[in-house]
Image: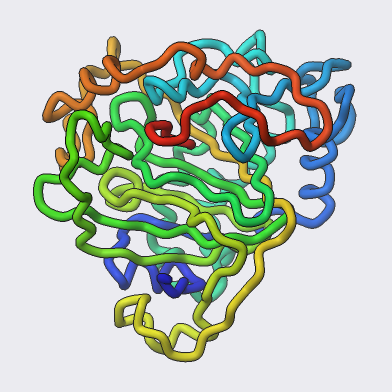
Amino acid sequence: MCVAVTTSDALNALGVKGATLVTEFVTEQEEAEILAFLDEETPTSSGASGDARRGEAIRWQRLAKRRVAHFGFAFDYGTRDASERAENSPDGALPGFCRTILDRLRAAKLNASAFGEEEETRKTCYGFERATRCDQLTVNEYPAGVGLAPHVDTHSAFGPVIFSLSLAGNAVMEFRRLDGEETSMGERDPKEDKKPIRVAERHAIALPRRSMLALAAEARYEWQHYIPHRKRDVVQDSEESCEHRSDVIGSVTSVPRAPRRVSLTFRERRDVAVHGPCECSWPNACDSRFGAAQRLKRRARPGLVAKATRLDGDAMEGTDEPRSRSIDV
């Protein structure tokens, strides 16, 4: 099990460049308002919900062990892009509370004191100035023990920064960099490639409740990120050993996960027709190189486009979605 550091300075020191963690990014009241909006049978325009879907229930999509909801544009789990309007946002707008969050991110770029003693974070705040360009939101609801498959968000489909807000519970996010000519886009089709995946490095960071994690540069484009499927995580008590690999165990604590965690992932869509294919510095993880984009199109399956069906209560099981080749984002 990979031992998680607790600051983005420590994670960057381990080699995962471009990750920024801000703890207590939202207040307890803001957290409660956002969760109330997502949980409401009939959201209204009051409080954090803004004008999104006034008087209509949130439409959730059922995955293997969790449920997701999309706003602005729907994430397509077959092609891993977002080109169609989400059912929760027929006008393409994000919920009203998103403006507060995205404006706060952009303002934080100019406010060095927002990050306390983390010197590197104060210097960089990688990509925060682009936050208000985000036009796609995916909400994931995780029961205890449920995680997220390793993946890199599609280079050609989304902008240079991914923002993730953790609510209701804690988790650990792991990062892995693959060896040699491995592609980091996500799980490979076992019918196409039966070679085992070779992992060169693995590191982890703890995501406390109400924290915001931003991924840019190498952390966004090269390192696969994922939430391990487990009910407890191992977290470093201090950052004295941040110069070393995170799997060197010093003083650590085993931390149980909460019964429920809700993550909000904000992305800026990228139009290939306008901007062209991705020409980044990380071709091994890029869908625009090595034919990866064509493989994705060939593997896209009907039924994975994010057109949600209504879910009642906490129903999570009974899905027909195949687990082996889906990339859960």
Quadrant for the N terminus in the image: bottom left
Which color scheme does this rendered protein use? rainbow
Lateral position of residue 303 relative to residue 72, left or right: left
Question: In the rendered view, would you say 84 is above or below 259?
Answer: above
Residue 292 in the image: state x and y as whole percent.
Answer: 20, 27
Residue 114 in the image: state x and y as whole percent.
Answer: 59, 63
Residue 167 in the image: state x and y as whole percent.
Answer: 69, 51
Lateral position of residue 119 relative to residue 113, left or right: left
Front position in the image: 202 or 117: 202
Front position in the image: 247 or 289: 247
Q: Residue at x 62, y 45 (%)?
A: 263
Lateral position of residue 231 relative to residue 329, left or right: right
Res. 56 image quadrant: top right
Residue 22 in the image: state x and y as whole percent.
Answer: 56, 60
Lateral position of residue 152 relative to residue 66, left or right: left
Res. 232 image quadrant: bottom right
Front position in the image: 185 or 240: 185
Q: Residue at x 50, y 23 (%)?
A: 75
Q: How many marks?
A: 0
Residue 102 seen in render: no
Q: Residue at x 44, y 55 (%)?
A: 125
Residue 255 seen in render: yes
Question: In the rendered view, would you say 264 is above or below 133?
Answer: below
Q: Residue at x 69, y 39 (%)?
A: 100
Question: In the rendered view, would you say 59 is above or below 112?
Answer: above
